[in-house]
Each structure stands twice: as structure tokens, then as C-alpha cells.
Amino acid sequence: MSEQGNIALHTTNLHVGYKKGHQTQVLFEPLNIQLIQGELVCFMGSNGVGKTTLIKTLAGIYPPLGGSVTHQYPVAIVLTDKISGGLMTVRDLVTYGRYPHLNRWLTLQDQDHRLIDNALRLVHLQSIENKQLNQLSDGQLQMAMIAKALAQDTNMLLLDEPTAHLDLNNRVEIMNLLRTLAREEGKTILVATHELDLALQTADKIWLATQDQKIVEGMPETGAGWHL
Amino acid sequence: MKKSSPSLVLLFLTTGLGVLFLTNISLGSVSIPIKEILRALFSDTGTASEILWQFRLPKALTCILAGSALATGGLLMQTLFRNPMAGPDVLGLTSGASLFVALLLMAGQYSGLAFIQGPWSVALAASLGGATVFILIIGIARYVQDNTALLIVGLMISAATSSVVSVLQFTSQANDLQTFMIWMLGSVGSTNWSEIIVLALIVVAGLAISMTMIKALNGMLLGESYAVSLGINIKQGRIIIVLITGMMVGAVTAFCGPIAFVGLAVPHLVRLILPTTNHKTLLPAVCLGGATLLLLCDILAQLPGSTQVLPLNAITSLIGAPIVIWMVIKAKRISV
């Protein structure tokens, strides 16, 4: 693995946080971090430390309080936000991934159908593409959300705790899928997670959000752990 | 779950609308054979055509406009608030309109507004009242993120305005009270052609604009963060949807009074036969469904075969409430 790959995303003195009334709450020290193309980075840290805020800032959903985020590519995200629309089919949800490329009448081209099919295939949901979301298990729903992000056909994925509330099988399956996507599709992936074991086994790098408002980058134990 | 093809459902609804439209204009206190109706549609002489053009066509057209506007307004509000219970009457829009109309009709002698009474000023008061409550709700929605909390705020606004209205009713004179009560019962039969043209312009514009907003509407179901990440301008979309909903519901309430139930129930009835969340299909289906349902309610309100006419609101709620209860029991849950 080369350490000197292309930089897919980097931040310059990024101030991450939020405004509450007239007060500004900054969550981290000014950040100068980077993601290398094709890497799977696991982002760890205790609850409330600001992982979600950082991910949303990197994705451009929240404005930075200072400094800047520079991406080489558009970003697709998987969040913990609840979505409405229990009657929505899996395919309809994945179709959302194509929205940035569709006109206001949402006319799908062959290319869009192909990318949706491909996303469904990658997460193994083709057989239930017409099922409604309220009929899915938590694991299937999470896979469908990942498929939506994949259908966006971006080189970068940011995921906020995609394995939360899932059983071990599903957690392993999702982390393996992310590793495959990074290895085989060359996607740059940042995933916030609490799964230390799985992170050590799958990640190329680990980011640790510490209590003193820093993000420490480290390598998972080398050698062991690449085989589950 | 069995699948119904969207185009088949739309075809079915369009046919139903056509049949009910013809049925609606052929029924009334004077019985006119259907042949005569069809002839009168294309001529302007004779008693039949006078009845048709003066009374029945305006009423049937008002039904179609009001039904589609209220149902679409209900769908837009359910999507906007991501809440299956949202609707013009639930969130206090119609009670806001009622309050302003009550102030105009019953407090006129105190406020010195008595001289401006008339159908157009009632319409203006209703629109202003609906818009005021809607702006209030949207303002509160910026601070209250929780949709259930917002719904409770809406119900409280309804309760507060209703109590002011009842105080006004208690202290007002019999004549004014009667004018107000008749407006409150809802009616599609009192609109003249110039009012229908105004209503039609507002409703058609509202429906057309909402059809251009399907991307934003679909995006709202995923919530703001996802919508932003998909390149949807959700803030702009929200403002436009609020404006067109307020405009359409306000206009209908202005001319027809507060018509209950249609806005809340039609989107759910449509989702029952056409289980989808894609507004590209939902919007036209809900629009047709609302028009069809209000035509049907109006036919029933005329009590076919008699000269009596029941208040429209009695019928919409009487048919509507059991359908919604049955639907909730059958589906065990209800979603946006």
C-alpha cells in the first residue's frame, strides 16, 4: 500500500462545530487532515465527541466555522438520520442517489438504471428491490442506504455509524463490503464506528477523536487481522 | 403487497372523475334527463341550460377545484412536516381562516368593518387568516424540530382560535351568527363565475408549481441533510411549498368555507390503492382523488331524489371518518 497516493480530501485549519444562539461551540482544534484515495479510514471516538458534526462538515452539509474543506470528488453520505416514507421501495430509495444528475421531472436514463442495478448488486439487495422500507430488517435498511450512496457514483463515501444497532453478522457484512469497495472499486471511505475489533481488522487507518479535541491518526496493528 | 400500476390507477381516477362529473351535473332538485344535460352543455337557450350554467356547472367545477386543491395541500403539508397527521384543518389553517371571517362577520359592528362585508371581503379575510396561522406555524417550526410537538402547537392554535370564535358567536347578533354558521358549514354552491375564475387561476397555478417541485418534495422525505447532499435546494423548496399550500388552501377556504377531512384523508386513501412515496405519481393521483371525492360528497349532500340539501362538511366528515378509521385498523400503521 502506498502512503503517497492521491489526496482525495483535505482540510485546512478547519474549525468544526455549531452555533447555538450567539455562542459558538467549537468541537475540535483546527484540523488539518486528509483522506487518501482508495483508503478505508475508521473514525472512532466516544459518543458526543463530534464525529457526526465533523462528517456533516466534511460532506458540506454544515458550513465550516472557519478554515476550509477541499475535495477532489463529490461525496456521498450515509447518516443516522431517520427517513420518512415507509411505503418507499428499496429501488426508489436507491434511485435518490441519481437525483444530483436528474432533471426536475426525474427522468431516468439507461445510465441511471445501470448504476442503480449495480448499486443493488453490490449490497446484494436485487432480490428485494421492490420491497417496501417498512418491511425491511435494520440490516437490510442500512444496506439500502449504502446502495443509495453507491448509486451516486462518487469516489468518496462518508458513513456515520452504519453498523449501529445491528447484529454481529450485519456489522461484519457491512465492514467487509466497505473494505471491498475501497479495494476493488478504489473508493475513498471514511466510516465512523464504535467497532474497535472490526476497525482494526478492516481499516487502512484509524482516526481517533480524543477528549482533548484532537484527531489522532494511527495505523491498525500491522500484519494480523486482514483475514477474518 | 399487490402492485397497482400508476398509469392504471390514474386512468381509473380520471374515468371516475368524468363519470361523477356527469352524474353530479345531472342530479339536483329539478330532474333533467342526461340527454337534455348533454344538449344543454352546448347551448345557452332553454331552462335546462340555464339551470346547468347558472347552478350546476359552477358547483361541479368548484367541487373539482376545491377537492384537488385541498387534497394536494394536504399531501404537501404531510410531506413538508413529514407527518401523516398533517393537513390544513389539523394544523389550524382553517381555524385561522374561521377566526378572521368571524371577526369580519360578527365583530363588524365593534370594529367598524361592517361596511366592507361581502363575498370578496370574506374571501380576503379567510385567506389572511389562513396565511397568518401558516406563517406562525412555519415560524415555530424553525425552533421546534420535533414534528409531533409541532402538531400539538397546531392543535393548540386551533383550540385558541376556536374559543375566540365561540366568544364572538356568544356575543353576536342572530343575523351575523347565521351568516357565519352557513359559511362554517362549507359550501361549493355559492360561487359565481368570476369567483370560479379566480379560484381556478390560483388552484391551477398552485398545482402546476407543485408538479415542478417533485424533486424537492421527494427529497424532504429523506430529511434536510440527505436532501442537501443530493444537491436539492431544500430551503427554497420549503418556502415555495409553504406559499403554494397556503395560497391554494386559503383560496378554497375563502370561497367555500372550511371543508373538513379532504386534505388529511385523500393522500392516505390514494396511498392505499397506490402504495408509493414518489410525488411524480402521488401528486396527480391525489389531485384527481380529491376532486373525485368532493364530487361524490356533493352528490350525496344533494340527497338524490329530494329537494333537500345537506351541508357539505357533514358529508365529508361522515364518509371520511369511518374510511380513515378502517384504513388505520387495516394497515395497522400509517405513514407519509
Image (cartoon, coloured by chain):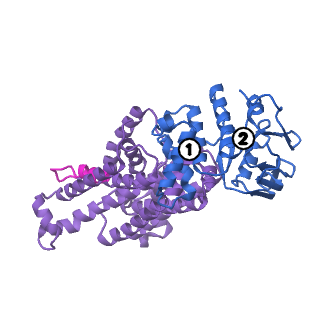
Q: Is residue A146 left or right of residue A203?
A: left
* Above-or-below relation of B192 to A92: below
Dot placed on the residue nearer the N-terminal end, 1 or 2: 1
- Mark 1, Cα crowd under 10 Å, few <14 / some 14-19 / many 20+, is many
Residue B58 as seen in the image, left or right of residue B131: left
How many marks on residues? Answer: 2
Q: Which residue is the extreme one toward the front? A: A1
Q: Nearer the viewer, residue A212 or B193?
A: A212
Give the magenta-colored segment's residue range: B292-308
Read off the residue under disc 2: A191
Vertical position of residue B39 compared to residue A123: above or below: below
**Where residue B321 appears, x then y in whole percent?**
37, 41
The purple-tinted chain is B
Mark 1 or 2: the one toward you = 1
**Chain identifier of the residue bearing label 1 in the image:** A
Q: Callout 1: helix, strand or loop?
A: helix
Q: Position of residue B318 (x, y in %)?
A: 32, 43
In this view, A191 is above or below A167: below
Q: In the rendered structure, which amino acid carries the disc numbered 2?
A: Val
